[in-house]
Amino acid sequence: MRVVADSGLCQGHQLCQGEAPDVFGFDAGADVVVVLDPRPPEERRADVSAAVKYCPAFALSIEED
């Protein structure tokens, strides 16, 4: 699994950090999400999927390898 964030769509809500803080960070200067771990371990899939699902700007996605 590969995590992708579209900084052009991100609105800085930071909900993703609540779901997977080890995968998603935040650039306060740019007010956008930062992917800290673009290829998290499979056991993180549920949390990463929740972050993608609950992103209000639809800025996150998972690409399968």
Image (cartoon, rainbow, N blue to C red):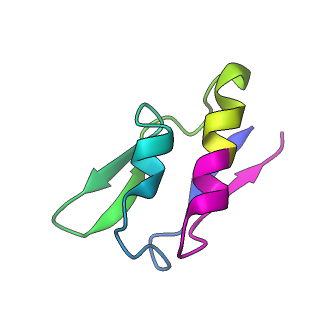
Q: Residue visible at 63% across and 56% down?
A: 52
Q: Residue visible at 61% across and 72% down?
A: 58
Where residue 64 sits, quadrant-wise, is top right
Magenta span includes 63: yes
Where residue 42 sits, quadrant-wise, is top right
Vertically, is 2 above or below 9? above
Q: Is residue 27 left or right of residue 23?
A: left
Q: Residue visible at 55% across and 64% down?
A: 55
Vertically, is 58 above or below 38? below
**In the image, which residues are magenta?**
50-65
Vertically, is 32 above or below 39? below
Quadrant in which the N terminus is drawn: top right
Q: Residue visible at 43% across and 31% down?
A: 22
Residue 60 place in picture, x, y as percent? 60, 61
Quadrant in which the C terminus is drawn: top right
Residue 38 place in picture, x, y as percent? 56, 40
Residue 7 place in picture, x, y as percent? 45, 70
Magenta span includes 9: no
Q: Is residue 46 visible?
A: yes
Q: Is residue 27 left or right of residue 10?
A: left
